[in-house]
Image (cartoon, grey):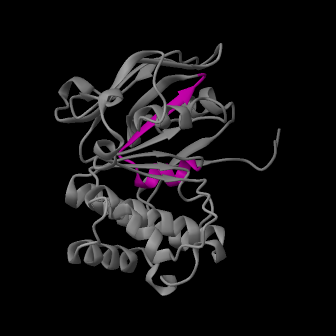
Amino acid sequence: MKLSFFIVADQSAMVGYMVELKEVSFAYDLYSVIKDISFNFDTGCFYSILGPNGCGKTTLLDLLIGHLKPISGKVVLQEHNIASMSKREIAKQIALVSQNYNINFPFTVKEVVMMGRHPYIGRFANPSMEDIEIVNRVMERTGTESFAHRKITDLSGGERQRCVFARALCQDTPLLFLDEAFSNMDISHTIRLLNLVKREVKERDRTVISVFHDINLAAIWSDVLIFMKDGKIVASGKTEDVMLESIIEEVFHVKTEIAYSHYSCARQAHFRAYDHD
């Protein structure tokens, strides 16, 4: 089944868009990476972007958070063109957990997590009691309090990623971006943090936009899946509607069998280790 453009979600029925892509395109030099994408991200929803390497997933995130500027079209954040917003204004709206976080100065973990409160702290001011309470609460929830006083340069990759995750949550933003945020974590911490984020979506109406490589993890926790290929969105909609064999085959060029798992309460993809034919 050939899919050129396949949208399941009826976005005309949605209101209260958190962030919008309006005919956005982007290129590195002459190489086109994002091609005329329009999409609306609603409040209180967990979105996951899926697609093969090089399809434009991380570039799309960089456009959404204002790190890159489109060559055409615009990104609108709560009715404001993100290109006209200051870094401080954006930091009060958007938090990012990236798969790559390099810091060579030996800050303690608690100092790094406190950096998430910087958009709310005056230039020469000290953290308030509220800032300290937020940091302590988030570190407890993310399981990072046990190494609060260790140097971040001494941490394993998974511990460092949990620290960065805690810092992002301390920003207390309505929008949370996860760019392969669980790539270095073991499965127990991945599940713990995904459950935490899902509660934030349900209880606090946060919007989460994530990039996943693991299709099955995305299917368990996401409300909406967005499939990308060659710089375009080729399928999107509610997870149960677009978690389909035909879409995965078209996007990833692999055969799969999709079946509902009563244990994970989600549709899951099953792959063969080798060809039996």
Q: Is residue 49 above or below residue 109?
A: above
State the image coordinates of residue 45 (x, y, percent, origin top left): 29, 46
Residue at the (60%, 67%) spot, across then down: 105
Q: Is residue 201 above or below residue 7?
A: below
Q: Which residues are magenta?
A: 214-230
- The part of the image, by quadrant, that contains residue 85 is top left
Using the rendered image of the protein, determine whether residue 190 is visible from the camera's viewpoint. Answer: no
Foreground residue, 193 or 145?
A: 145
Foreground residue, 107 or 162?
A: 107
Q: Is residue 197 above or below residue 188?
A: above
Foreground residue, 76 or 222?
A: 76
Residue at the (44%, 76%) spot, across then down: 110
For this view, does 30 lie left or right of residue 73? right
- The part of the image, by quadrant, that contains residue 182 is bottom right
Quadrant housing the N terminus: top right
Q: Is residue 113 magenta?
A: no
For this view, does 114 lie left or right of residue 248? left
Using the rendered image of the protein, determine whether residue 122 is visible from the camera's viewpoint. Answer: yes
State the image coordinates of residue 154 (x, y, percent, origin top left): 65, 77
Number of numbered markers: 0
Quadrant housing the C terminus: top right
Foreground residue, 144 or 271?
A: 144
For this view, does 103 lie left or right of residue 209? right
State the image coordinates of residue 188 (x, y, percent, origin top left): 53, 73
Residue at the (37%, 80%) spot, across then down: 140
For this view, does 58 lie left or right of residue 204? right
Q: Is residue 225 magenta?
A: yes
